[in-house]
Image (cartoon, rainbow, N blue to C red):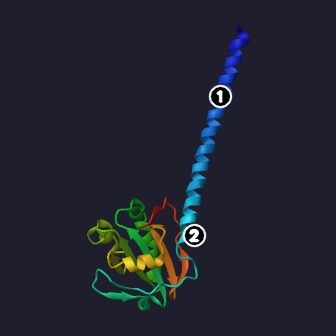
Amino acid sequence: MPYVIVGLVLVGAVALLNLVLLMVILRRWQELEGVRRRDDFAAQGPQPGDGLPDFTATALSGRTLTQDDFRSGELLLGVFSHDCPSCTDSLPDFAERADRARAAGGRVLALVIGAEAGESSLTAQLRGPADEVVPEPEASGLFRALRVPAFPTILSYQDGVVAAPSAADREPVSAAS
């Protein structure tokens, strides 16, 4: 009888160890899948060396913007969705990058996508960090031309050419529309 009890305890301990190892492996696999998904999203959008597409849009300030306004110097371009939690979470990082871009003589442009983008709280919050904010429907043409795969997307342009896409540190939200 004692051998049976010892055997059952051993089998139980091995099963418990197996369960713990399985949970660790599944968690790590999930983390790696998230990293792969972010990398896949980044590979679909604008890449270093891509030029700023032709566009004309009216900003909330009433100013008409074209690609020619941003062909020289540094441009930080943020693309957000009005109902994206990751976009709201990224505002402090965007504001910090905007300050650095302005300090280097650059400009900051924010696009806000979504049917209610003009009246959204995100649009209001972007008015501080961004020099110009362009909500949908005005932002639609540039948004489609950029082929933005996920929200938020932050692009650094130098003389009208993508210098560096953003490195997403949050789970991306698909921008397919």
Task: Give coordinates of residue 12: x percent, y percent.
Answer: 65, 23
For marks 2 and 1, give the one nearer the viewer.
2
Task: Give coordinates of residue 94: x percent, y percent.
Answer: 43, 71
Decide if residue 29 is on the left or right side of residue 155.
right
Position of 35 relative to 138 (above/below): above
Marks 2 and 1 sit apart, C-alpha to C-alpha, by 42 Å
Q: What is the three-letter code of the residue carrying label 1?
A: Ala
In the foreground, 139 or 63 = 139
In the foreground, 11 or 45 = 45
Question: Which quadrant would the C terminus be assigned to in this image?
Answer: bottom left
User: Which residue corresponds to the image point at 34% horizontal and 78% vertical from the top-left?
Assistant: 134
Farthest right residue in view: 3
Q: What is the three-letter code of the residue carrying label 2?
A: Ala
Question: Which quadrant would the N terminus be assigned to in this image?
Answer: top right
User: Which residue corresponds to the image point at 55% horizontal and 68% vertical from the top-left?
Assistant: 42
Whichever of callouts 2 and 1 sits on the residue coming sooner in the sequence is 1
| Mark 2: secondary structure | helix
Task: Give coordinates of residue 50: x percent, y percent.
Answer: 55, 82
Decide if residue 112 is on the left or right side of residue 150.
left
> Which residue lies under the disc numbered 2?
43
Decide if residue 136 is on the left or right side of residue 69.
left
> Which residue lies under the disc numbered 1?
15
| Mark 1: secondary structure | helix
User: Which residue corresponds to the image point at 28% horizontal and 72% vertical from the top-left?
Assistant: 118
Q: Is residue 55 visible?
A: yes
